[in-house]
Amino acid sequence: MLFLLVAYILVSFIAVVVFSVFLYYAVRPLFRFLDRFGLGVQLRAAISIVLFGLPFLILIAYAVAVVGLEIRALLDGELADRVIQELNIAQLDLAALENIATGDQVQVSVSILADSVLGAAGVVGSVLVQLLLIVTATYYMLVDGPKLTAWLLDTYDDSGIGQRYVDEVDPELSLALFGNIVNVFVTAIVAIVTFYVYNTFVPAAISIPFPALLGALAGIGSLIPVVGIKLVYIPLSAGIGLNAVLTGQPELLVSVAVLFVVSAIIVDFIPDFVIRAQVSSDDTHTGALIIAYIVGPSIFGFYGLFFAPILLILTTNAVTVLLPYLLGDRHPSQTTLDEFETTTSKTVESED
């Protein structure tokens, strides 16, 4: 009953748990690096969270907010206006007509303003509470996580299979969460900054539409090795280059070429061949990880970007490590029936 209650609480705060696990693996490299300076565990945990964890979360939140605003501008600004124009109702404001007809325009405005303020306050308060929970959980995972893991293994893992499972899962989670996810966000942020800087120096004819959204797509494309990011900046360069020609300004193709070269080096080459070289792994299938990154947010929401890879790694290692043990396989190195028969015959002879 107690375990069911704990499971219910964890499920209720599943997003907080997932983000805490992600932040733990994100700051753990810095936490371990600080050990060489002789600092205490608690001080290292606090420094790691303050110097890297919180700024990284804020940067992610800001990037996601900017991308969200551009998606809304794309959908509400262009598509919605186009639909209204096609329906020929652009001059009709039903809400305003209702307020004027009832004489409740001021009251409605005040009510809407009050509801908006209260709603915003509730959202901000909820976000701050969840952020506090994430930071607190991450701190104690850094400080007491190894002790708790060691106690559980010493108490309940007489066979050693639990230790083997942890040894397989831990590095894979580190690579999937810290390595690949950080690579996505670093690529996206670099692309967003690059596109915004480009827009500040070029005329509107060859400016990048929705630079934050396209930058985010470049980050997501980095999940696909080699070709992923190219699927964003190559069509983008071709599109704005074609626009320069169609507007009778071929001299602007020089700026487009600069964008292409800068994108190829800064957005594509450096993250893909420098960062990925440090975080690549052969244990978890790349295609399965890509599917997890794509399917996760569509099923669980934004935190699914982290939750789906966690489930994938836990499940695949459970199948390869725990399942053979549970089925009674005590010969993990055995690959053929002949080896089993040889081992069995030797056992029988020794008993005789």
Image (cartoon, rainbow, N blue to C red):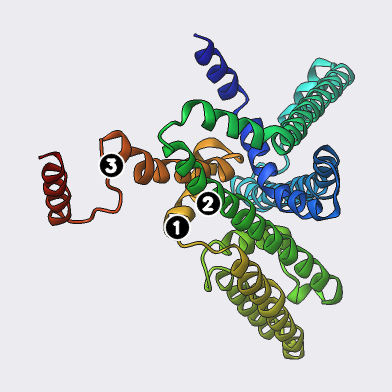
* Residue 165 pos. (x, y %): 46, 42
Query: Residue drawn 75% across and 75% down?
Result: 205
Q: Residue 220, relative to residue 15: is it above or below? A: below
> Residue tagged by mark 2?
172
> Residue tagged by mark 3?
330
Who comes first in sequence, dot 2 or dot 3? 2
Labels 2 and 1 touching (C-beta < 8 A): yes
Dot 3 amino acid type: Arg
> Residue tagged by mark 1?
283
Q: CA distance from mark 1 to mark 3?
A: 22 Å
* Residue 54 pos. (x, y %): 81, 44
Q: CA distance from mark 2 to mark 1?
A: 7 Å
Quadrant of res 184: bottom right
Dot 1 amino acid type: Asp
Considering the numbered disc 2 on the image, is that residue within a helix, a strand or a loop?
helix
Q: Quadrant of the C terminus?
A: top left
The answer to whether 19 appears left or right of 160 in the picture is: right
Q: CA distance from mark 2 to mark 3?
A: 24 Å
Quadrant of res 100: top right
The answer to whether 325 appears left or right of 17 in the picture is: left
Q: Residue 42, relative to residue 249: is it above or below? A: above
